[in-house]
Every structure is written in C-alpha cells, then in structure tokens.
Image: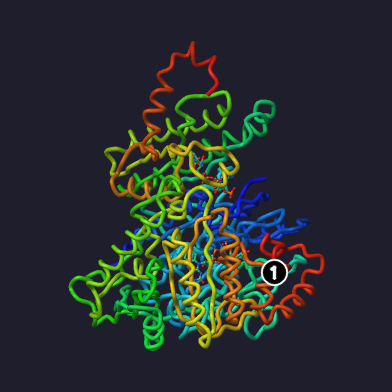
Amino acid sequence: MPDQRSVLILGGGSDIGRAAGLAFAAKGWTVRLAGRDLQGLTREADDIRTRTGATVSVHRFDALDTPSFDGFLDGLPALPDAVVSAVGVLGDQGAAERDVAEATRIMRSNFEGPALILGLVANRFEARGSGTIVGISSVAGDRGRATNYIYGSAKAAFTAFLSGLRNRLARKGVHVVTVKPGFVRTRMTAGMALPGLLTVDPDVVGNAIYAAVEKRTDVVYVARAWQPVMFAIRSIPERLFKTMKI
Amino acid sequence: MTRLTGWGRYPDLETELVEPRRLGEVRGAFAEADGVIARGNGRAYGDAAIGVRRTVSIRQLDRMRSFDPETGRITVEAGTLLGDVIAAVLPRGHFPMVVPGTRHVSVGGAIAADIHGKNHHRDGGFGASVERMTLLLPDGSTVETSPTLEPGLFRATVGGMGLTGAILEATIRLKPVESGWIRQRTLPAADLSSVMRALDAGDEATYSVAWIDTLASGRNLGRSLVFLGEHARADELGPKEAERYPALAGPRLSVPLDFPSFTLNRLSVGVFNRIYHRVNARREGAPFTVPAGPYFFPLDGVGAWNRIYGRRGFVQHQCVLPPETAESALGEILERVARRGSSSFLAVLKKLGPSWGMLSFPKPGFTLALDFPVTDDLASFLAGLDEIVVEAGGRLYLAKDSQQSRATFEAGYPDLDGFRSIRRRLDPDRRLRSHLADRLGL
Ligand SMILES: Cc1cc2nc3c(=O)[nH]c(=O)nc-3n(C[C@H](O)[C@H](O)[C@H](O)COP(=O)(O)OP(=O)(O)OC[C@H]3O[C@@H](n4cnc5c(N)ncnc54)[C@H](O)[C@@H]3O)c2cc1C
Ligand SMILES: NC(=O)c1ccc[n+]([C@@H]2O[C@H](COP(=O)([O-])OP(=O)(O)OC[C@H]3O[C@@H](n4cnc5c(N)ncnc54)[C@H](OP(=O)(O)O)[C@@H]3O)[C@@H](O)[C@H]2O)c1
C-alpha cells in the first residue's frame, strides 16, 4: 500500500530542497515542489519522478510576495501533511552593510517570507489537528559574526520564530522541526572552502529532514560535530568574541 | 587553475575546471574556450578527460528526465551515473544493456568511450543501446543524433572520446530482468589455452570474464578463473534471496591514504592472487547466486582503491587482439609480465565482438587489461608490449591509455582518417582538445 502522504517543499529547486524531495519520494510520499523558477522545478520534478516513481507536482511560489501566500496555499490540490521551507539567500554581506535594498532582500528571504508562510501553514495545520513543519535555519543564527551577521540575524529570527511556533502548537498535534544543516555542498556555498568534517552533501540533509519528520525531532544539527562547536562559540564572552576573527 | 588526473592518478595535469549546473550553462562553458573537453566522472584512467586549457565537468547535469517501464527506455542528462540509473530501474525490473567494472561512470562517459561489459561478445557496446542523444557541437549549436538521424555524427560520437562535442542528454534502451541476482559459475583454467577455450565455450553465457594470475609462469602461464553469469529468473531465487532486488551496496572499506608503493611488490601480489584462487576454487562448477552489485562491480566495495598503487599512480594497459593471433601474443605479453614481477593486481581477460563507433575500442578477439604502478622504466616496458600488440594486429583502449605512441594508435584504428575528417568539418579550429587528443593527433 503506497504512502498517501504529501510534502510541500518551498524552495524545491534548491539543492537541499531537492534532496529532501527525493528522500520523501523514496518512501512513497507525494512531493510538491514550489518556487520561482518553474522550468528549474520541472527538471527536478521529472528527476524525482523518474528515480522513484512517486507523484510529483510543481507550483509557483515567491517568498517575497507575501500577499500571495493565502492564495498559494488555497491553490494546492490538498493541504499537505508536511511542509519544508528551504528558502533562503546568502546574499553579499559587504554589499548589505552599505545597501539597504540588499540587506532587506536577505532579511526578507531568510526570515520574513519563510516565517509568514509557515505561520499560515501552521494555522491550517492547527485547524486540522495534524501536520509537520520543517524550517531550514542555520548555525549562522546561533551567534552573529562579522562576516555574515545580516544573513545570520535573519536566521536567528527564523530560529526563534520556529521555536515559538513549536511551543504554541505542541499540544495541538502539530510538530515543528528546526534544521541547522551546518555547511552543505550546494549552489549557495559553491566556490567556498569548506571544512571537511563539518560539511555534508545535500542528500545527508535530505535524509535527516525525512527522519526528523518521522521521529518528530525538535532541533536537528545535521553534522553532529556542529553542536559542540556552536556550544563553544556561544560560550565565548562577548568581551572576547568581539575582537576575534572567526 | 587546478590539477586533474584520471582514475590512474597519472598523468597529473593543469587545467581550468568549470562545473556548469544547468544545461543552459554548458554552452557558455564551451564558448570562447580553446583547448576544452567534457569530463564525466573521471573514471577513464589517463588523459582523456583533461582539457588542454579547460575541462568542463558534466557531472552536475545528473537529472533523470523520464523512464518508461513498458518499453524499457530511460532518458537522462549525460552526467547521470550508471549506478544511479541501476538504482532507479532495477527495482522496477530493468537493467542497462551494458555495464563496466564500476558503477561510478557517467552515461556521457559510457557513450564517449563506447564502453564494453562482460557481454560484449553477445550484445555489443554501450553505444548500441543508445537510442538518441543531444549533442552540443563545437560551434555552439545543439543537435539530435541517433543511428538514423545524422548517423555519421552518431558513429563518430559513440567512442569519440568527447571530441565531437558535449553529450548533454541521452535515451538508452534497458533490458528486462526478473531479479537483481546473478547466477554465477566459476571455472578454473590451468593455462592460457584452456582459459581461451573456456571463454570460447562460454559464448552462450550472457556474461563471461576471466581473472588471470599474472605471476604464474612456465606451464602454469595464464592460469585463471573464468566467471560466467546469467540474470537469475524469479523462479531460481531461494529463501537466501528473499529480497528480489537487493540494493547496490556502497563501499564497505576504503583506502584512505596512499599506500607506500612497496606494499605492491611481488610478494603482496602473489599472496593476493593465491587467496583469490583458493576462495574461488571452492565454488568451482556449481552455480551459485550473488547480488548484481558485487558481481559486476567487485572493486566498488573498496572505496578509492586507486590509491593502493602509491603516490605516483598507475597505468592500465588494455589491448584487444584478433582471434588468430591472440594466443601467441597473449602468451608473450604474460611471459614478460610474469618476468617483470612487480605488476598487476588486476589482470582481466574477456572476449569482444564487433562495434561500429569509428573509434570504438572493441573488435572481435580477446582483450587483456593489466595494471602497472608508475615506475621509471614503465614507459619502455609498455612500449615493448605495444610492439607485440601492433604486430598481432591489435589495438589499445583510449579510455585506459596515457602512454601509447601515435604510431601504435594509427596502426590500430582503421577508421581514423574518417574520424579525423569529421573532426575537421565540425571543429576546424580544433577548439575541442583533450591531452589525449593532442598526444595522439586526434
Ligand atoms: C574500476 C573501473 C572499471 C572499469 N571497467 C570498464 C569496463 O569493464 N569496460 C569499459 O569499457 N570501461 C571500463 N572502465 C573505464 C570507464 O568505463 C570509461 O573510462 C568511462 O568512459 C568512464 O566514464 P566517466 O563518466 O568517468 O568519464 P570520464 O573518465 O570523465 O571521461 C571519459 C571520456 O569521455 C568523455 N566524456 C565524458 N562525459 C562526456 C560528455 N557528457 N560528453 C562528451 N564526452 C564526454 C571525456 O571527454 C573522455 O574522453 C573502467 C574504469 C574503472 C575505474
Ligand atoms: N548550503 C549551506 O551550507 C547551508 C547551511 C545552512 C543553511 N542553509 C539553508 O538551506 C536552505 C537551502 O539552501 P541551499 O544550500 O540548498 O542553497 P540554494 O540552492 O541556493 O537554495 C536556496 C533556495 O531558496 C530559494 N529562494 C530564494 N529566494 C526565494 C524567494 N523569494 N522565493 C522563493 N524561493 C526563493 C531559491 O530559489 P531560486 O532558485 O528561485 O533562487 C533556492 O531554491 C536555505 O535556507 C539556506 O539558508 C544552507
């Protein structure tokens, strides 16, 4: 008996979103990929369908177009069983320090858009009394650093939002997962020198997301080594931290 | 700039590596470049997939487009790995017509080298299973080609080592199978003529291959194990084969560091071969069932095994010899190898049939593959083997090559002039150039 459940992946054309789609499809879920680039999404949908035989559909979604959110959710074939947000932009920290438009884009794409859409999903899940919400946040939100604090602060806000949502819905049958992938080899990090031990491939994140949904995990650090690393980084006194280059 | 090698880790050459993520970006990666070549998964051993100036990796183009289980046709982007194709289609009762000794090759690389499997004598090369493909030509245009559509271009591209353009997408024909298991029979062969006879007799088997003990000499010269295989039918599966389509396993073991080259001396190879014989001789004759993964891809069980030959890398020498001259030429080659001592972890003997790509390696006869760690005297030793091959009317496989001379190459490939004239027409300025192409004047 095939699984009848469906998952909606916002930012379904991302490397991590695609990997999550494959992980769910491999278990027989129906996968709905949403994003801005329909052509790119169709390519991913064909791939997932061919590899797994699952049902896959694509949907237009722009995380910066907040007024469209209700209509977008109403337009889906059915309210999904799980929603994953892989939306995000790294942006250009240097440019964002000088240019309000770039800073706004980073903040809205990593916090405002994903938080607001998941908030609307949460209300629908709450009314139904079931559902799982997965937000991909980042260890960059665990502490602001000079090199990426605009992205990091938006992710920090997103992490706080997810934790509040989880708290609100804990007794309503709705579960919320916060994923902090660490470094992942994706389009976002292409060309960056990444530390081997703390870096994983997208499929590892995809499988971790699927497992977190099935096991109802709260917070997932994908590469385990990150948890102590971020604990250590958070424990450095601000007086010292502010002079450090990390 | 970066440095790249093939699977043999020799030669090690400088090139600019570009990794487009979408079909549309490939054209840009090839445009305005001079001395550029496509690269798949880098499993060719030598210098075939290294551009003189720029190398365009097609690996990121690994999306599958469609699969029709009714007709057994799958369409994939050219960077898709054959192992991923198997993972997708085997649980639905299909298998590629041709697989090589590793599942980590891309479909583009499989076409460009017109790779052969253990069934070449029956089913031909990978190119024969290609229904159509999309090719990005050197002038930046994209064409569809198939055995009937632009057939000349198709024959030049199958086996053409990337020198007609970049393969972007292909539709390949699969064969139906009833399980993911192989019924294997292992036959010991005492010497060279008996292994050749065993392979001849094995012509009816779908798959056949022999492993040769390269240290055996004198009257044991050519002592081997012959492996015959068939896809197991559903009614041949026992309780041990409860899982009808077992997954292809990932590497269980990996070679993390470069082995010091002394581990590969005469002694360790001898020990390896002896163990190998003992383990396998016990299963002599009676058929037994093994999962397709370890049957076809035994070395994939050891990750990064190419490091076992040490820092300087290794060369694989693979020749094909016509049936009339094969026995004496093989005898001579094996004698030299046994005398040399420090060789071949791997010596594989197979039968091949005809192929129709202009530069396809296979032709009727026997193919022998030998691995040699790179040493100072290796080039002259191999030049000696090449003389035997040329004398016997044989030729060498470009996907393994990094050593042969232009003369050896030209003697072995009669369709070369035709290929060169297609090259001149498609790429008058010779913009597509791998190190292999420059070395051999392709
Ligand atoms: C362990 C092992 C076992 C093997 N066993 C066999 C065997 O049994 N039979 C056999 O025939 N071969 C065998 N090979 C060789 C291997 O199958 C070929 O070298 C194959 O071409 C490798 O594919 P790749 O994707 O790694 O291509 P690469 O090594 O990256 O490239 C090989 C050639 O293909 C060209 N190419 C790659 N992709 C494209 C593209 N998209 N468009 C145009 N040109 C392209 C390159 O320019 C290059 O000339 C084996 C190799 C290994 C390492
Ligand atoms: N890679 C890492 O190391 C890493 C580490 C921690 C967290 N993350 C997070 O993981 C998530 C996925 O990232 P990734 O690494 O897979 O990189 P990616 O491929 O660049 O993914 C980012 C995705 O966000 C989408 N997106 C951006 N703005 C959007 C908008 N306004 N509307 C709709 N979609 C929008 C992009 O779609 P388009 O194709 O339309 O641009 C893309 O699909 C992101 O949230 C990222 O912050 C990544």
- Please name the residue shown 33% across and 45% down the image: A212
Image check: B111 left or right of A172?
A: right
Image check: B350 left or right of B396?
A: left
For label 1, the residue is B406
Relative image position of residue B159 (x, y in whole percent): 61, 74
- Please name the residue shown 69% across and 69% down the image: B406
Q: Nearer the viewer, residue A174 or A100?
A: A100
Check disc 1: other Cα within 10 Å, few if <14, some if 14-19, many if 20+.
few
Amino acid type at mark 1: Arg
Q: Quadrant of residue A180?
A: top left
Q: Outermost residue, left direction?
A: B239
Q: How is the image coloured?
A: rainbow
A197 lies above or below B266: above
Q: Chain for mark 1?
A: B
Q: Quadrant of residue A139?
A: top left
B336 lies above or below A147: below
Element assignment for label 1? helix
**Number of numbered discs:** 1
Quadrant position of ligand 2: top right
Relative image position of residue A84 (x, y in whole percent): 43, 47
Please say whether residue B68 is visible from this viewpoint: no
Relative image position of residue B104 (x, y in whole percent): 47, 62
Q: Nearer the viewer, residue B163 or A146?
A: B163
Q: Outermost residue, top direction?
A: A239
Image check: B425 left or right of A246?
A: right
Please say whether residue A23 is visible from this viewpoint: yes
- Please name the residue shown 50% across and 72% down the image: B333
Q: Quadrant of the N terminus of chain A?
A: bottom left
Relative image position of residue A37 (x, y in whole percent): 60, 55
B274 lies above or below A203: below
